């Protein structure tokens, strides 16, 4: 059981597999067309297709945003700004491109302190990275707070990573807002709720002029033909997506209830995972679960996550299995 990378534990829609089976030798031999996929994403989010940049997973979108922002070296070494803890790709992309990552530590509740972020802006700051809901805690950020922050930090770019927004049901994507705040970019992935992580397809949404510098960074045809064909089909199967989101919501509730019963600390997650403080034997607990065929993520070395593991909340049957195993491991540890 792969409960450590927040993948879709049910797999993709059966309709996606049928669409992939229809592809043949010429599809592999030719560069893909993106029109249908781009239109499907635009329709999904209620924006014209020119507001959509398809990327090889959202990771490439993060890399493209960092690459576009960090070109400006007028004040010396350019900086990206974020919070700690956070998804490690923000820092990885920034440093790979010769920039410096500045992180503002979050407090124990993982809530965003917008004033602390604004105070960390320097003449070298080029872009701010935030995830909503936050990773690894799952704590959501109010949308109005993000819009206000985007206006406050301008002309610095604000990149909001909405990798888990399908589960929270809230998004910043709105054509009027994107036009009004031209420094706002929103990243989305189809790896989580849609279950096509292995195909590697994501999108960055923004006003066309805002996306233009990113288009210069993303190589042509970085999204492969199989991903381009699968994406419109995955988006069209709304019933499958909604079923999985409901499974994840029930699993989150089960994880939170079990944690309370076992005396473990959690945070109010709006994503498809729950962060759980399991105690000083966190490493042994992770290993004991692995022996039972269950992989969870050890986040205990990150700021604010001491003694914590992160557990994917997916199919309910999987969640019941991991909870039974976790209770068994904790009882063994108490003996």
Image (tube, rainbow, N blue to C red):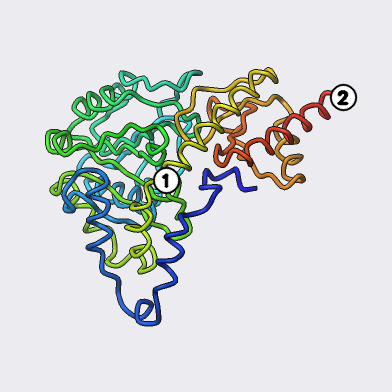
Element under disc 1: helix
Q: CA distance from mark 2 to mark 1?
A: 42 Å
Q: Where residue 229 appears, x then y in whole percent?
A: 34, 65
Find disc 1 in the rendering and name its residue: 241
> Sequence order check: which comes first, mark 2 or mark 1?
1
At horizontal 30% and vertical 71% (from top left) the residue drawn is: 32
Q: Where residue 173 appears, x then y in whole percent?
A: 24, 38
Name the front one of labels 2 and 1. Answer: 1
**Viewer-proximal residue, 236 or 151?**
236
Query: How many C-alpha atoms fall within 10 Å of the one at disc 1: few (<14), some, or many (≥20)?
Result: many
Q: Where residue 264 appears, x then y in whole percent?
A: 65, 21
**Viewer-proximal residue, 20 or 282?**
20
Q: Where residue 147 appears, x then y in whole percent?
A: 23, 27
> In the displayed structure, would residue 301 be above or below residue 98?
above
At horizontal 29% and vertical 26% (from top left) the residue drawn is: 143
Relative placement, left or right, of 37 versus 134 is left
**Viewer-proximal residue, 170 or 89?**
170
Find disc 2 in the rendering and name its residue: 335
> In the displayed structure, would residue 230 be above or below residue 236?
below
Q: Residue furthest right?
A: 335
Q: Quadrant of residue 22?
A: bottom left
Relative placement, left or right, of 284 versus 180 is right
């Amino acid at each position: 059981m792969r409960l450590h990378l927040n993948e879709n534990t049910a797999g993709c829609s059966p309709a996606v597999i049928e669409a992939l089976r229809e592809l043949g030798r010429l599809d592999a031999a030719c560069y893909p067309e993106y029109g249908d996929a781009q239109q499907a994403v635009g329709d999904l989010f209620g924006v014209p297709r020119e507001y959509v940049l398809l990327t090889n997973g959202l990771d490439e979108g993060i890399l493209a945003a960092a690459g576009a922002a960090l070109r400006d070296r007028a004040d010396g070494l350019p900086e990206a700004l974020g919070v700690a803890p956070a998804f490690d790709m923000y820092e990885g992309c920034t440093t790979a491109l010769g920039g410096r990552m500045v992180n503002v530590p979050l407090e124990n509740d993982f809530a965003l302190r917008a004033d602390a972020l604004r105070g960390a802006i320097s003449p070298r700051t080029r872009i701010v990275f935030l995830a909503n809901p936050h990773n690894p805690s799952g704590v959501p950020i109010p949308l109005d707070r993000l819009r206000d922050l985007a206006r406050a930090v301008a002309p610095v770019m604000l990149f909001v990573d909405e990798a888990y927004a399908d589960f929270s049901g809230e998004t910043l994507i709105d054509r009027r807002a994107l036009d009004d705040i031209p420094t706002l970019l929103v990243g989305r992935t189809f790896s989580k709720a849609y279950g096509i992580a292995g195909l590697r397809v994501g999108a960055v949404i923004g006003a066309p002029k805002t996306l233009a510098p990113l288009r210069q960074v993303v190589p042509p045809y970085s999204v492969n033909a199989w991903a381009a064909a699968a994406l419109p089909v995955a988006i069209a199967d709304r019933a499958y997506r909604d079923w999985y989101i409901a499974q994840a919501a029930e699993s989150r509730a089960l994880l939170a209830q079990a944690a309370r019963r076992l005396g473990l600390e959690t945070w109010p997650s709006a994503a498809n995972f729950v962060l759980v403080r399991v105690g000083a034997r966190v490493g042994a607990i992770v290993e004991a679960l692995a022996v039972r065929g269950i992989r969870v993520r050890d986040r205990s070395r990150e700021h604010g996550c001491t003694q914590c593991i992160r557990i994917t909340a997916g199919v309910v049957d999987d969640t019941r299995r991991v909870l039974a195993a976790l209770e068994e491991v904790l009882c063994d540890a108490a003996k």
